[in-house]
């Protein structure tokens, strides 16, 4: 099947970056991906802050920073409540919506944060954060795909062993896209492969798994190029991936010691043992929380009368008895006591580690805010100064930058972000929102996200000698518009990469910003199992 109608094909490879790809290129394991890079222009693709899937892919496909599109992580907040993000939380137009306005059709397969899908000229099969059997566009498309290619799933079957299940998912993406490309004959195609990221979270240090999954992706890329014959092909990733060999800072533990966080046992937040519990469920265990043991029961009982490990620790430190803290309060007491942030009583806290920042509990803004608005700037500056000085146990700077959100986000939704942004030093340092009894410890995950991904552009009209050394995530959407000869949105923050000729800006209509709730516990469980949801989120 040759489909001459695809002008531009975007292949999204989650977490792809030079440190992951180069060793595989040396083994000649990825001939199709390598040929795109060698035949065109390529370079590192700097991600945004925060460089995580749920916020970064919307930034890539809108060309706008999170302050404009409104998604800062896997969760969205209303007061102290939270919900998993979905496509209605993205308040800037996606590429396929802009192209529909230009009477160009699109086929979009497996892209994160695209459920529920918009009505466009073409087809959308949602990816990550969608339900397992998502609504697609047009209605009934998922059943049609399954009838045509056989099994199609958004998420892995947890009963099957890795990496075989991930490889099957990769092949499903390619088969579904090829079928839809033939059926809709789009001008623009976008297929995303998520398992190249998930393998590092689920199976850290299994390089044999990584290689097998990347080989499967490369095979699909080769088949896509052969069958769809795009004029221009672009490979892009939302961030990079690498080892974390330094320290983990338990931010709320630190803020507790500094007097900004108050804690509670129980409450509306998610318990710190939820990731462990989900792991047990995935392995066929019963849905029981870990037994807290005698120490935990004692802590839990004390909490009922207001005596938590945090309060006891602060009292001992205030009395100059820091040395007694570890002996009086066992290292596992907080975990056992299921301690979490009391959002209403805390001045500032980390709600979600992947947001890379602190939220302040501001009077008149949060339901039970305690930081007076008149003191907002002074308290925020105090927090920035405090965090800027944090050093790891071996004397290294914990952060390469700590600053106000305005330095990282701008636009109508910037005030929905964290108040203070924290950028880990070279993304070697890990952050956690959990209480674990110590301020510092080893990283919870040995592999996690890095700032630089990769971009490569090859095909007709592409300047293969163009310097893409300054490419940014926000540049992908305007570059795709240019490759298609379509005007880019005047609300995009990125620029057209020099490998293609730029097009003019255009004032596209603004989106309807009505938001729907995401009511799917299965999605929450999957995010937790991958380490994206911690105890205080």
Image (tube, rainbow, N blue to C red):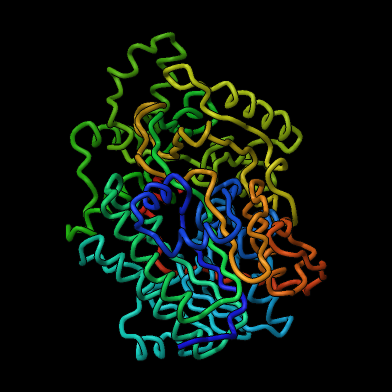
Residue 198 position, x and y percent, is: 37, 56
The quadrant of the rendering that contains the N terminus is bottom left
Is 16 displayed left or right of 372 in the figure?
A: left
- At horizontal 34% and vertical 66% (from top left) the residue drawn is 216
Residue 192 position, x and y percent, is: 48, 67
* Most foreground residue, 15 or 467: 467
- At horizontal 71% and vertical 40% (from top left) the residue drawn is 407
Q: Which of the 4 quarters of the picture holds residue 310?
A: top left
- At horizontal 37% and vertical 54% (from top left) the residue drawn is 528
Residue 320 position, x and y percent, is: 43, 8
Q: Which of the 4 quarters of the picture holds residue 169?
A: bottom left
* Most foreground residue, 441 or 123: 123
- At horizontal 37% and vertical 69% (from top left) the residue drawn is 219
Residue 258 position, x and y percent, is: 52, 23
Q: Could one spot residue 267 in this view of the protein?
A: no
- Note whether 285 is above or below 356 in the view shown: below
Is 120 displayed left or right of 268 in the figure?
A: right
Q: Could one spot residue 427 in this view of the protein?
A: yes
Disc tally is: 0
């Amino acid at each position: 099947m040759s489909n001459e109608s695809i002008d531009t094909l975007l292949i999204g490879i989650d977490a792809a970056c030079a440190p992951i790809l180069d060793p595989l290129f040396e083994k000649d394991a990825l001939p199709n991906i390598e040929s795109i890079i060698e035949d065109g222009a390529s370079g590192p693709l700097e991600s945004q802050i925060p460089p995580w899937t749920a916020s970064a892919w919307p930034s890539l496909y809108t060309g706008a920073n999170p302050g404009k599109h409104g998604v800062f992580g896997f969760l969205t907040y209303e007061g102290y409540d939270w919900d998993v993000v979905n496509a209605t939380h993205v308040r800037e137009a996606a590429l396929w919506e802009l192209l529909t306005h230009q009477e160009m059709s699109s086929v979009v397969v497996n892209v994160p944060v695209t459920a529920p899908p918009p009505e466009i000229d073409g087809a959308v099969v949602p990816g990550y954060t969608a339900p397992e059997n998502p609504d697609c566009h047009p209605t009934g498309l998922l059943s049609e795909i399954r009838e045509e290619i056989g099994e199609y799933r958004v998420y892995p079957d947890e009963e099957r062993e890795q990496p075989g299940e991930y490889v099957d998912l990769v092949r499903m993406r390619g088969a579904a896209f090829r079928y839809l490309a033939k059926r809709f004959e789009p001008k623009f195609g976008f297929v995303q492969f998520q398992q190249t990221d998930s393998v590092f979270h689920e199976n850290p240090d299994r390089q044999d798994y990584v290689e097998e999954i990347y080989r499967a992706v490369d095979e699909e890329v080769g088949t896509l190029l052969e069958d769809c014959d795009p004029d221009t092909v672009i490979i892009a990733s939302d961030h990079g991936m690498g080892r974390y060999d330094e320290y983990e800072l338990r931010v709320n533990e630190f803020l507790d010691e500094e007097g900004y966080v108050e804690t509670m046992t129980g409450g509306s937040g998610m318990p710190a043992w939820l990731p462990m519990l989900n792991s047990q469920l995935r392995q066929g265990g019963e849905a029981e929380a870990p037994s807290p043991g005698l120490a935990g029961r004692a802590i839990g009982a004390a909490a009922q009368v207001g005596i938590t490990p945090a309060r006891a620790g602060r009292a001992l430190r205030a009395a100059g008895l820091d040395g007694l803290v570890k002996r009086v309060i066992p290292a596992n007491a907080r975990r056992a006591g299921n301690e979490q942030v009391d959002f209403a009583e805390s001045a500032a806290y980390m709600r979600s580690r992947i947001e890379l920042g602190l939220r302040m509990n501001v009077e008149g803004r949060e339901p039970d805010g305690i930081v007076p608005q008149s003191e907002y700037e002074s308290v925020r500056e105090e927090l920035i100064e405090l965090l800027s000085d944090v050093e790891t146990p071996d004397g290294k700077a914990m952060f390469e930058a700590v600053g106000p959100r305005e330095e990282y986000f701008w636009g109508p939704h910037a005030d929905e972000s964290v108040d203070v942004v924290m950028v880990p030093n070279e993304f070697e340092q890990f952050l956690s929102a959990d209480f674990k009894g110590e301020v510092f410890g080893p990283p919870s995950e040995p592999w996690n996200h890095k700032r630089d991904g990769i971009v490569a552009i090859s095909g007709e009209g592409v300047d293969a000698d163009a310097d893409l050394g300054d490419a940014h995530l926000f540049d992908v959407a305007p570059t795709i518009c240019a490759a298609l000869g379509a005007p880019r949105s005047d609300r995009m923050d990125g620029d057209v990469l020099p490998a293609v000729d730029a097009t003019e800006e255009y004032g596209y209509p603004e989106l309807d910003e009505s938001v729907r709730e995401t009511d799917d516990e299965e999605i929450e469980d999957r995010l937790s199992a991958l380490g994206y949801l911690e105890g205080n989120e």
